[in-house]
Amino acid sequence: ADGNGATATRRNVAIVGAGPVGSLAALNFARMGHEVQLYEYREDIRKAQLVQGRSINLALSQRGRKALAAVGLEQQVLATAIPMRGRMLHSVKGRTSIVLYDPCNNQCLYSVGRKRLNELLLDACDAFPNIHCHFEHKLVKANIREGRLQFRQGKEKQKPRQKEQEQEQEPAQEQLICASADLIVGCDGAFSALRQQLVRQPGFNYSQEYIGTGYLELCIPAKDNEFQMPPNYLHIWPRDSFMMIALPNQDKSFTVTLSMPFEVFEQLKTQQQLLDFFRTHYVDALPLIGEQQLIKDFFKSRPQHLMSVKCKPYHYMDKALILGDAAHAMVPYYGQGLNAGMEDLTLLNSILNQQLTLDVALEKFTESRWRDAHAICDLAMYNYVEMRDLTKRWSFRCRKWLDTTLFRLFPNQWVPLYNSVSFTSMPYSQCIANRQWQDQLLRKVLNGTIVLSSLVAVGAIYVRRFR
Ligand code: FAD
């Protein structure tokens, strides 16, 4: 602990939510010497069965890796991950083509199991005597001024099928538990209960946006203990207003995410309609998923909603803070939600290690983070269009080729947008500014080329006519 800084005083820190961001936050606060109480609504994920339909794997990239490296877990996580070197695009006819993410430096994304990642983080928490985990504790009330919390303890009761959202689940027996803390950190996801308390504070800005697209998870199982498609790619079936993607798993299966407007989901009412739809749009994927399995998985659950949350500030005095999806949930199309949440902790650490009082440090955190958090929410919306529509256009591929060529020639000056987001720690807002600068330059060059070629053409006509 340093001088009068935010880490000097040993505090009681209550972290709400033991997902990937909450458990990483616990490790960070514990390493600073604070006493950490980690509260999680669900049962210990290490004892739980895999929950189907809840994004089984995730694409981990530079920002998440950096935050994991800071707590000594990067290599352990990567050891269980599958590298994805690029996008493999599947056409309507079932033909495939590859667009590498980074032909210059061979950087890749890593497909990691959400459960495995969370387990590794919680195992690491167990090694700290100053981290105390409380599972099956759901935050129901918080007084952030006074640092008081109320939890409902008990096993969550799963309602019948299709009731999968957190607020639709109920504990079997109710028991209320009270606790207090010097600092409350909300890492309780997109529907954060702690954020609901912050919303009541004057000066708190908040917006949320649901998109008209839902997602549903399917599976391409392993066959003869082998992958049924090349494993080192993120597979995409872009189909204009909808799409499907697949990420590889350790057990040689693929988790497939079907994203479509809710109206399209609603049109698929019968087994025949579903099979016809897949025969038309995903002809190569259908035999890999298997007709019977597709029917079973598709009708088993309802498409999930996707939303984007922007808010500011992320803190209340030196009393409360929100991180990860609680602060900036986004649509999943840039594969950055988790990476951004983990990057929150890289930034928070660097600020807490400065000689600042906690209230000033948290204020500085909000000020340094909100533009970038809002920027990645916007980029994630943009990438949805890119993935489902633009990837199959020639203009997109030409631009990709141009970006790659310029990146190869000027690796420090011309970093393409996707690379800056996924393979660097460049602030997200700067990634956007960088892209705008590149677009302007290319536009000028293109206009210049058009003017020049027009002049040459006019010159040539003139010479022919009057020769
Ligand atoms: P969560 O993972 O939501 O964890 C919150 C935790 O808090 C949960 O354990 C929950 O049980 C607990 N909790 C909730 N309410 C309470 C309460 N009241 N009391 C106590 N505990 C509570 N991101 C990527 O970086 N790459 C990807 O490839 C990617 N793919 C995705 C695909 C899909 C389909 C989706 C939906 C998201 C994807 N994301 C991806 C985003 C990523 O899943 C989230 O950004 C990430 O899980 C956020 O972590 P978190 O810990 O902040 O929140």
Image: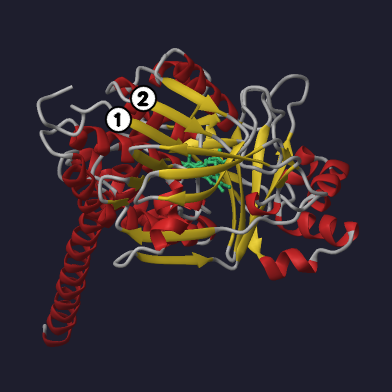
- For numbered disc 1, what is the local secondary structure? loop
**Residue topped by disc 1:** 11
Q: Is residue 171 left or right of residue 67?
A: right
> As shown in the figure, which amino acid type bears the numbered disc 1?
Arg
Residue 347 percent across, percent down from the top left:
25, 38
Residue 317 percent across, percent down from the top left:
25, 50
> As shown in the figure, which amino acid type bears the numbered disc 2?
Glu
- For numbered disc 2, what is the local secondary structure? strand
**Numbered circles on residues, count:** 2
**Residue at 18% across, 27% down:** 8
Q: Is residue 287 left or right of residue 17?
A: right
User: Does the rendering let one see residue 387?
Assistant: yes
**Residue at 16% across, 75% down:** 451
Using the image, determine if residue 315 lies above or below residue 347. Answer: below
Task: Please state, as top left, top right, bottom left or bottom right, where the N terminus lies in the image.
Answer: top left
Judging from the image, the colouring scheme is: secondary structure
Q: Callout 2: 10 Å neighbours few (<14), some, many (20+)? A: many
37 and 112: which is toward the camera = 37
**Residue at 59% across, 44% down:** 96
Ligand 1 contact, mark 1 (Cβ < 8 Å): no
Residue 424 percent across, percent down from the top left:
27, 38
User: Gap between marks 1 and 2, in whole Å?
Assistant: 6 Å
Using the image, determine if residue 181 lies above or below residue 206. Answer: above
Q: Hey, which quadrant is residue 180 in on the image?
A: top left
**Residue topped by disc 2:** 35
Cβ–Cβ under 8 Å for marks 1 and 2: yes
Residue 47 percent across, percent down from the top left:
67, 22
Q: Callout 1: 10 Å neighbours few (<14), some, many (20+)? A: some
